[in-house]
Image (tube, rainbow, N blue to C red):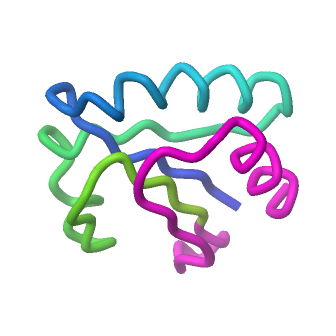
Amino acid sequence: MSVLYFSADWCGPCKSFKPVVQQVSQELGVSVNYVNVDYDASLTQKYSITSVPTIMVTNYQGDEVYRKSGVLSREQLISMFNQFK
């Protein structure tokens, strides 16, 4: 499993959600790959990211198994991480 967090420096919701993602992932021992859509066009295009923030889970083959755009609550994020741990 791989967790990708797509965001941008200019995105207000991204700025408020990223610290939550960082804290929860650290607490649960989940590795997150942070992708800035302005600098990593290859992953952004590969997964057709059209809005930020977007959090995505892929399997080991790189196939998408979960995607959610927008800000999640801390509880929703914990539940999502636990589901795919």
Please tell me which residue lies in front, 25 or 76. Answer: 76
User: Does residue 73 lie above or below 17 as drawn?
Assistant: below
30 relative position to 37: left or right: right
| Residue 73 location, quadrant | top right
78 relative position to 51: left or right: right
Which residue is painted at 20% across and 68% down in the image?
A: 45
Please tell me which residue lies in front, 31 or 77. Answer: 77
The magenta stretch spans which residues? Answer: 58-85
User: Does residue 49 lie above or below 73 as drawn?
Assistant: below
Please tell me which residue lies in front, 1 or 71. Answer: 71
Residue 49 position in % (x across, y down): 27, 65
Please tell me which residue lies in front, 74 or 83. Answer: 74
Tell how many labels.
Answer: 0
Decide whether residue 81 is among the magenta residues. yes
Which residue is painted at 42% across and 59% down in the image?
A: 69
Which residue is painted at 50% across and 63% down in the image?
A: 68
| Residue 78 location, quadrant | top right
| Residue 15 location, quadrant | top left
User: Does residue 64 lie above or below 32 as drawn?
Assistant: below
User: Does residue 42 lie above or below 30 as drawn?
Assistant: below
Residue 39 position in % (x across, y down): 15, 38
Quarter the C terminus occupies: bottom right
Residue 1 position in % (x across, y down): 71, 61
Decide whether residue 29 is among the magenta residues. no
